[in-house]
Amino acid sequence: MSDKQDQAHERLKRLVEEFEGGPPSLPIPAMIEAVVGPAYDKELESLVTMALSANSGGMSLKEIADGILAIEDWRISLA
Protein backbone atom coordinates (compact mmCIF):
# COMPACT_ATOMS: atom_id res chain seq x y z
CA MET A 1 0.00 0.00 0.00
CA SER A 2 1.29 3.44 -0.82
CA ASP A 3 2.04 6.10 1.74
CA LYS A 4 -0.79 8.21 0.27
CA GLN A 5 -3.25 5.36 0.85
CA ASP A 6 -1.95 4.72 4.38
CA GLN A 7 -2.32 8.38 5.30
CA ALA A 8 -5.83 8.61 3.80
CA HIS A 9 -6.91 5.48 5.67
CA GLU A 10 -5.55 6.84 8.96
CA ARG A 11 -7.34 10.18 8.50
CA LEU A 12 -10.61 8.38 7.76
CA LYS A 13 -10.10 6.13 10.79
CA ARG A 14 -9.60 9.19 13.03
CA LEU A 15 -12.76 10.76 11.62
CA VAL A 16 -14.76 7.61 12.42
CA GLU A 17 -13.43 7.67 15.98
CA GLU A 18 -14.82 11.22 16.35
CA PHE A 19 -18.32 10.12 15.28
CA GLU A 20 -20.25 7.98 17.75
CA GLY A 21 -22.44 6.34 15.11
CA GLY A 22 -19.60 5.07 12.94
CA PRO A 23 -19.38 4.93 9.14
CA PRO A 24 -23.10 4.77 8.26
CA SER A 25 -23.71 8.08 10.03
CA LEU A 26 -20.65 9.84 8.63
CA PRO A 27 -21.47 12.59 6.17
CA ILE A 28 -19.99 11.78 2.77
CA PRO A 29 -18.40 15.24 2.45
CA ALA A 30 -16.57 14.63 5.74
CA MET A 31 -15.28 11.28 4.48
CA ILE A 32 -14.06 12.81 1.22
CA GLU A 33 -12.36 15.67 3.02
CA ALA A 34 -10.64 13.24 5.38
CA VAL A 35 -9.32 11.24 2.43
CA VAL A 36 -8.40 13.89 -0.17
CA GLY A 37 -8.51 17.17 1.75
CA PRO A 38 -10.81 20.17 1.52
CA ALA A 39 -10.05 20.99 -2.14
CA TYR A 40 -12.58 18.66 -3.78
CA ASP A 41 -15.54 19.53 -5.98
CA LYS A 42 -19.19 18.56 -6.23
CA GLU A 43 -18.51 16.12 -9.08
CA LEU A 44 -16.22 14.05 -6.85
CA GLU A 45 -18.85 14.18 -4.11
CA SER A 46 -21.51 12.96 -6.56
CA LEU A 47 -19.33 10.11 -7.84
CA VAL A 48 -18.42 8.97 -4.32
CA THR A 49 -22.07 9.18 -3.24
CA MET A 50 -23.14 7.02 -6.19
CA ALA A 51 -20.38 4.49 -5.53
CA LEU A 52 -21.22 4.19 -1.83
CA SER A 53 -24.96 3.98 -2.55
CA ALA A 54 -24.42 1.22 -5.12
CA ASN A 55 -22.57 -0.95 -2.62
CA SER A 56 -25.10 -3.01 -0.70
CA GLY A 57 -22.61 -5.36 0.92
CA GLY A 58 -20.81 -2.82 3.06
CA MET A 59 -17.21 -1.69 2.89
CA SER A 60 -14.28 -1.47 5.25
CA LEU A 61 -12.71 1.91 5.98
CA LYS A 62 -9.70 0.89 3.92
CA GLU A 63 -11.96 0.06 0.96
CA ILE A 64 -13.76 3.40 1.30
CA ALA A 65 -10.49 5.37 1.46
CA ASP A 66 -8.98 3.42 -1.45
CA GLY A 67 -12.18 3.83 -3.46
CA ILE A 68 -12.29 7.60 -2.97
CA LEU A 69 -8.63 7.84 -3.98
CA ALA A 70 -9.27 5.64 -7.03
CA ILE A 71 -12.18 7.83 -8.16
CA GLU A 72 -10.05 10.95 -7.72
CA ASP A 73 -7.14 9.38 -9.64
CA TRP A 74 -9.50 8.23 -12.40
CA ARG A 75 -10.86 11.77 -12.83
CA ILE A 76 -7.35 13.21 -12.96
CA SER A 77 -6.33 10.68 -15.61
CA LEU A 78 -9.23 11.79 -17.81
CA ALA A 79 -8.33 15.48 -17.59
Image (tube, rainbow, N blue to C red):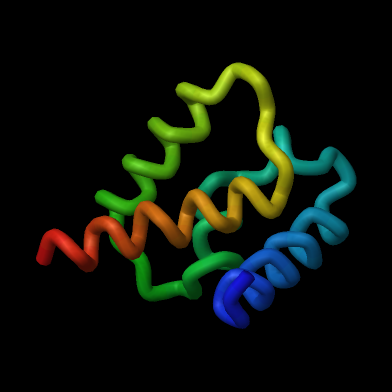
Residue found 46% across the figure and 22% down from its top = 54
Residue at image position (67%, 73%) is 6
Pick the residue in front: 58 or 19.
Answer: 58
What x and y, as percent, mark residue 57? 65, 20
Residue at figure coordinates x 28%, y 57% from the top left: 74
Q: Residue at x 33, y 53 (%)?
A: 44
The outermost residue toward the front is: 1
Percent x, y of residue 12: 69, 62
Q: In what quadrant of the picture does the N terminus appear?
A: bottom right
Quadrant of the rendered structure where residue 9 is?
Answer: bottom right
- Residue 71 horizontal/vertical position (percent): 36, 53
Extreme-bottom residue of the structure: 3
Q: In the rendered view, would you say 79 is above or below 16?
A: below
Count the labels in the image.
0
Front-most of 13 and 63? 63
Classify 11 as above or below 78: below
x and y percentages locating residue 31 in the rendered image: 59, 55
Quarter that holds the C terminus: bottom left
Q: Is residue 70 above or below residue 49?
A: below
> Is 7 situated left or right of 78 in this image?
right
Q: Residue furthest top?
A: 56
